[in-house]
Image: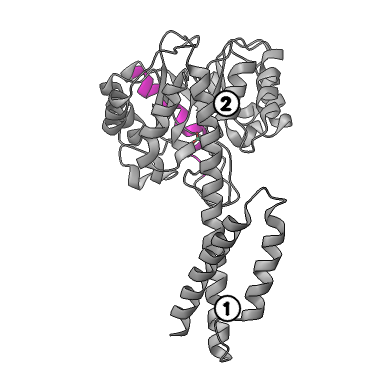
């Protein structure tokens, strides 16, 4: 693979990690059979958030990949995080490199990679950094461009959350769209696997990416997903991958009505995100309420503390107006939370 074509969606699939020679080969053969793979991915060096998890098979995995390429004709892409990775990949004629989310955050690391690519002709994909920092993503791409890399694509894999949310990583589609607006010359690929973090949301995320006119998808696929050494929850078999791609509706970008829809989607995503956070906070609030219930039981205190309730009401009703909320809504909202809190304490006490 020498360049990123934009005439057709670029479909990238393969395991999160190369684990064994057999797994690399079997995944490749079965993915090839779907007829829906343009580029085979596998992690050789795995940047893991915490130590003592599987950190990749290392350079031993590269010949497994090239043997698989010989058998299937599928070009290869591998994640690189430093100059020595680049050197080994070039030695094995890996077709495309990608920079992972945990590397894009670090300008020193990206610069080291860019320097090691001076004068080399190879396509490179840059994942968004794990934090929603648009300039950092763009900066990574610019470093590669300055090093003379001509074929560059961006991969949107979502952004880390403080609290647990519906998707493993927050999509923040508006950042990817901002990227597209700023650099329409750079293809943008969606990685629903890392974005969603679980199998059941891959189709909805992939379809969304197609609706937003993304240039391709990168999806993790494993011959035995539940037994995968990394990212087991989000991997799917090659056959399921084939069905997912078959099920996608590839839309033409009707330029005139798209911006309208995109803006609405953007706002809805923000609402969903806030609702996720509210739910998480409510869950936390109720677990504190249950602790209070246990304390009241131990000390034989009544559940309803009238003074305390009056205090809560006063404190928030006063703020309602400043927060552009009606007093009536504020009262209903506080009463609903208070009722549930009393019920939860009741259950602890009885
Ligand atoms: C991966 O692609 O397996 C990976 C580590 O992804 P990310 O850098 O997006 O977390
Ligand atoms: Mn992964």
Whether 241 is drawn above or below 7: the answer is: below
| Figure quadrant of residue 129 | top right
Circle 2 packing at 10 Å, graded few (<14), some (14-19), many (20+), is many
Q: Pinpoint residue 53: horizontal percent, then vertical percent.
A: 51, 50
Magenta span has 38?
A: no
Instruction: Pick the residue in front: 120 or 168.
Output: 168
Whether 111 is drawn above or below 281: the answer is: above
Q: Using the image, tell me which numbered label, if any, was put on residue 111.
A: none
Is 270 placed left or right of 203 in the picture?
right
**Residue drawn at 52 percent across, 48 percent down:** 275
Q: Using the image, tell me which numbered label, if any, was put on residue 176.
A: 2
Question: Looking at the image, what colour scheme do you see?
Answer: one colour
Residue 171 shows up from this direction: no
**Residue drawn at 40 percent across, 13 percent down:** 252
Q: Pinpoint residue 156: horizontal percent, then vertical percent.
A: 54, 28
Is 40 placed left or right of 30 in the picture?
right
Among the two numbered marks 1 and 2 on one chain, the one whose residue lies closer to the N terminus: 2
Q: State the residue lying farthest toward the bottom.
A: 300
In the rendered structure, which segment of residues is drawn in magenta? 55-70
Is 118 placed left or right of 49 in the picture?
right
Instruction: Pick the residue in front: 333 or 16.
Output: 333
Q: Quadrant of the C terminus?
A: bottom left
Residue at which label 1 appears? 292
Circle 1 packing at 10 Å, graded few (<14), some (14-19), many (20+), is some
Q: Pinpoint residue 182: horizontal percent, then vertical percent.
A: 65, 17
Q: CA distance from mark 1 to mark 2?
A: 44 Å
Residue 266 shows up from this direction: yes
Q: Pinpoint residue 317: horizontal percent, then vertical percent.
A: 67, 61
Magenta span has 63?
A: yes
**Residue drawn at 57 percent across, 58 percent down:** 281
Regarding mark 1 in the picture, which secondary structure is present there?
A: helix
Magenta segment, prevailing SS (helix, strand or loop): helix
């Amino acid at each position: 693979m020498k360049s990123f074509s934009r005439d057709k969606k670029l479909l990238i699939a393969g395991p999160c990690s190369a684990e064994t020679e057999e797994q690399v080969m079997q995944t490749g053969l079965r993915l090839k059979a779907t007829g829906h793979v343009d580029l085979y991915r596998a992690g050789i060096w795995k940047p893991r958030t915490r130590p003592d998890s599987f950190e990749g098979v290392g350079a031993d995995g590269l010949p497994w990949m090239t043997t698989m390429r010989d058998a299937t004709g599928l070009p290869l892409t591998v994640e690189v995080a430093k100059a020595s990775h680049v050197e080994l990949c070039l030695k094995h004629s890996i077709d495309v490199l990608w920079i992972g989310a945990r590397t894009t955050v670090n300008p020193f690391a990206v610069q080291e990679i860019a320097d090691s690519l001076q004068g080399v002709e190879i396509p490179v994909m840059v994942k968004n950094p794990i934090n929603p920092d648009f300039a950092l993503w763009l900066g990574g791409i610019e470093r590669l461009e300055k090093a003379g890399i001509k074929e560059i694509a961006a991969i949107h894999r979502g952004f880390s959350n403080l609290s647990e949310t519906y998707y493993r990583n927050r999509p923040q589609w508006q950042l990817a769209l901002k990227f597209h607006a700023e650099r329409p010359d750079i293809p943008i690929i969606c990685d629903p696997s890392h974005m969603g973090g679980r199998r059941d949301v891959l189709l909805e995320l992939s379809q969304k990416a197609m609706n937003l006119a993304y240039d391709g998808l990168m999806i993790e696929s494993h011959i035995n997903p539940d037994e995968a050494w990394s990212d087991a929850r989000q991997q799917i078999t090659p056959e399921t991958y084939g069905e997912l791609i078959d099920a996608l509706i590839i839309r033409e970008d009707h330029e005139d009505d798209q911006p309208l829809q995109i803006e609405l989607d953007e706002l809805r995503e923000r609402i969903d995100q806030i609702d996720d956070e509210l739910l998480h906070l409510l869950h936390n609030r109720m677990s504190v309420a249950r602790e209070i219930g246990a304390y009241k039981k131990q000390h034989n205190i009544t559940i309803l503390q009238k003074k305390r309730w009056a205090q809560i009401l006063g404190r928030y009703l006063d703020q309602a107006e400043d927060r552009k909320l009606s007093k009536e809504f504020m009262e209903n909202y506080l009463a609903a939370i208070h009722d549930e809190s009393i019920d939860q304490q009741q259950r602890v006490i009885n």
